[in-house]
Image (cartoon, rainbow, N blue to C red):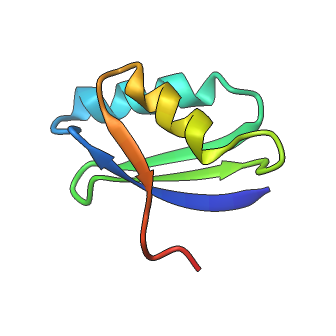
Amino acid sequence: MEKKTYDVIGMHCVSCSSAISKLLKKNKDIEDVEVYLSDSKLVITLDESKVSDQMVAETVGRLGYRAVPANNEK
């Protein structure tokens, strides 16, 4: 499992962050989801061989937000 950080565009309230977290947690290949509203960040512990950045972006996109890999990835 690997931790990945994403910038979330369009998230502006607790309901937004809660909806993102709930939807991502439905994926069995995602072990943990942390949503930081104040920083507009999303940190996911996932199986990178099964969950791609595109899959995360599409899932978050279904709720009307954009998730892009954070620039500070190591």
- Give the left or right position of residue 10, taking residue 33 as reference: left
Q: Quadrant of the C terminus?
A: bottom right
Q: Is residue 66 above or below residue 27?
A: below
- Give the left or right position of residue 28, taking residue 24 as reference: right
- Of residues 22 and 61, the one drawn nearer to the viewer in this rendering: 61
Q: Is residue 60 above or below residue 3?
A: above
- Give the left or right position of residue 52, taking residue 68 as reference: right
Residue placed furthest toward the front: 54
At horizontal 53% and vertical 74% (from top left) the residue drawn is 73
Q: Is residue 29 above or below residue 47?
A: above
How far across and how far down the image is residue 49, in percent?
83, 47
Q: Quadrant of the N terminus?
A: bottom right
How far across and how far down the image is residue 37, in percent?
26, 48
Q: How many numbered discs sit on the rendered protein?
A: 0
- Give the left or right position of residue 59, taking residue 37 as reference: right
How far across and how far down the image is residue 20, in percent?
41, 30
Location of residue 28 by image quarter: top right
- Of residues 47 and 53, the one drawn nearer to the viewer in this rendering: 53
Residue placed furthest toward the left: 12
Residue placed furthest toward the right: 49
How far across and how far down the image is residue 15, in percent?
25, 26
At horizontal 35% and vertical 21% (from top left) the residue drawn is 63
- Of residues 47 and 37, the one drawn nearer to the viewer in this rendering: 47
At horizontal 60% and vertical 29% (from top left) the residue drawn is 25
At horizontal 80% and vertical 39% (from top left) the residue drawn is 50
